[in-house]
Amino acid sequence: MSVLAGLCLLMKAQQPPDIKPLTIGDKVPDITITNVYNYRSSTIRLSDLKGKVVILDFWAVWCTGCVLAVPKLDSLQKEFQNRLQVILVNEQGEKNSAENEFKTRAFFHKWMKKSNGTFTLPYALKRIDRLDKLFPHIFIPHYVWISAEGKVLAITSSEEVTYQNISTLLKGFPSAMPLKSDKFSTNSQN
């Protein structure tokens, strides 16, 4: 019995630690984002972006608000090109389907044609479980802002993704953006 108990403890000690959700001020681990398109390689390591503010945009083609934000994000990326990196992280819901990947690729193919090939945002097509665990959310769009030093600056909705807020952060001022809440109430008071 004691040998069996010892083996159980040894096995538990060798398992990777649980991934805990991050919040404002936390250091972001050096995550590798895979299945990336419209970028110089098919992967992006966050450490490769050191020195830039990074905005992870969790989005989907079926989300109207997400799709409407794409031109604004692309413009902001162009405006702050050497100091900002926006990365679109595709949400796929419960299943990781080939149909969703097809629709997403078609969406970006259309954007590339519409922008005459000047669309600059990299996008990841596959769900990244580690990112989902680090930055859990229910509603999209969901934006995670990461400092040039790799710390979580803000977790916001789309209203906060503005020229002014990006400029403020790039100047080194602290974020005054409200934390996005995914909670809602079904109780309505008339």
Image (spheres, grey):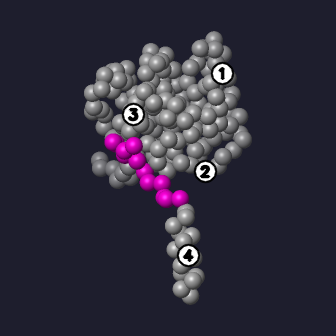
Tell me where residue 1 appears, x and y as whole percent.
56, 88
Q: Is residue 182 above or below residue 161?
A: below
Measured in 3D between alpha carbons, the distance from the residue under mark 4 to the one under mark 2, in whole angstroms, is 32 Å
| Picture disc at residue 94 | 2
Q: Residue at x 66, y 21 (%)?
A: 110
Measured in 3D between alpha carbons, the distance from the residue under mark 2 to the one under mark 1, in whole angstroms, is 26 Å
Q: Secondary structure at mark 2?
A: loop
Q: Give the number of the mark in front: 4 or 2.
A: 4
Residue 106: quadrant of the picture: top right
Does label 1 or label 4 sit earlier along the sequence? 4
Q: Secondary structure at mark 1?
A: helix
Circles 1 and 3, Cβ within 8 Å, touching? The answer is no
Measured in 3D between alpha carbons, the distance from the residue under mark 1 to the one under mark 3, in whole angstroms, is 35 Å
Q: Any magenta on residue 25?
A: yes
> Which range of residues does the magenta coloring cover?
16-27
Q: Residue at x 53, y 48 (%)?
A: 130
Q: Residue at x 50, y 41 (%)?
A: 30
Q: What type of secondary structure mainly makes up the magenta span?
A: loop
Please name the residue that numbered disc 3 is placed on: 149
Three-letter code for the amino acid on which mark 4 is drawn: Cys
